[in-house]
Image (cartoon, rainbow, N blue to C red):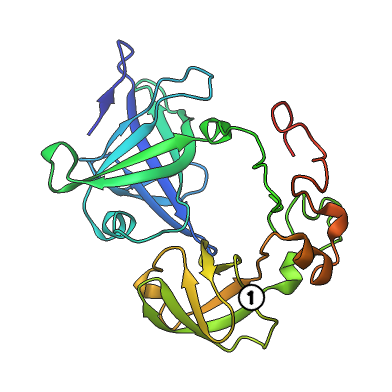
Amino acid sequence: MGYILGDNEKEAITLVTFMYGDTPTYVRYTNWSSDATHPISLEVFTSMVEMKVKLGKMTGMFDEPASSVSMLRNTFTESISEAEPHADIFVTVEELVQDPDETEQKLLTMFIGKVRRCIRGKGGKANNVYVECENVKSRFDVPLGLVTGNHCPWMLGRKGCDPSGTAINIESLKRTGTVTTIDGNTITITGLPSVATRYWHRGYVLFDGLPILIRDWASGDDFGLSLPPPAGWLGKVVTVYPGCDKTIETCRSRWSNEEHFCGAGYAMPPYHPVFERP
């Protein structure tokens, strides 16, 4: 199946790549009538002639309209449109163009971004999943500012909390354990070492690229998460990162990092939250 571009009568096919997870996992589709091979990577793209790609108008501004991919419901689209949290899904849309009178193909990158949301049956199309995507630039359109409170705004071990990269090595503090039960937002993780009270509180659990905040933990093996994890986490070995209650007492006694505490009334931030980025 060929697609006509304007008056040049050049055949073009669309190649869409989805990527997610730690491994990572790649899923590839094309709107060509048969499977297509990428001219550079030689990866195979599965044929889905019903797939429709709509690219948002490229204005060069932060608030560009979203792009979308409309696809048939299958194993992949069912998994990403379930009412469960999912690891970030990155999207690349390429167009392969070839003039009928030429042998040289032209590969154009049309879009790079991330899946924002997935909707089943949009517009009455029960067999379709509508995948809405945001481009890389739109993800920078985030208001800058700091909450004015006596709690520190920094994330444990990240920039701000550890500007030098030597104060708190968050990667050295992570531990692994096995998920043995899932009950809504509460999961049981066994195999973790004994740690101080509330050590994991406000940290997060990570598996295959999906982090979920630990909303409540004081002691023991039960963790209250901010979202119910996917059922596929059961029996898996997950990584658990410690958190911080953002008080100066904890910063001082547990992390010995009072120098970088930034609660209002204790310190001035090292950058202007309106005009500068950390």
Between residue 217 and residue 15, name the one nearer to us: 217
Residue 165 against residue 14 in the figure, above or below: below
Give the residue at x 59% y 83%. Answer: 219
x%, y% of residue 235?
43, 84
x%, y% of residue 220?
56, 87
Residue 229 against residue 117 in the figure, above or below: below
- Number of disc labels: 1
Taking the image as shown, residue 21 lies to the left or right of residue 8, namely: right
Give the residue at x 30% y 58%. Answer: 83
Where residue 169 sits, quadrant-wise, is bottom right
Between residue 163 and residue 178, name the one nearer to us: 163
Give the residue at x 42% y 63%. Answer: 227
Between residue 267 and residue 6, name the one nearer to us: 267
Amino acid type for the residue under numbered disc 1 = Arg
Where residue 258 sits, quadrant-wise, is bottom right
Taking the image as shown, residue 239 lies to the left or right of residue 268, namely: left
Task: Name the residue that disc number 1 marks.
Answer: 198
Secondary structure under tag 1 reads loop
Seen as rendered, the residue at the extreme top is 7
Taking the image as shown, residue 273 lies to the left or right of residue 191, namely: right
Residue 121 against residue 143 in the figure, above or below: below
x%, y% of residue 127?
14, 48
- Characterize the local packing of mark 1: few (<14), some (14-19) or many (20 or more) Cα atoms within 10 angstroms: some
Where residue 171 sits, quadrant-wise, is bottom right
Q: Quadrant of the C terminus?
A: top right
x%, y% of residue 204?
57, 66
Between residue 68 and residue 105, name the one nearer to us: 68
Give the residue at x 22% y 34%. Answer: 1
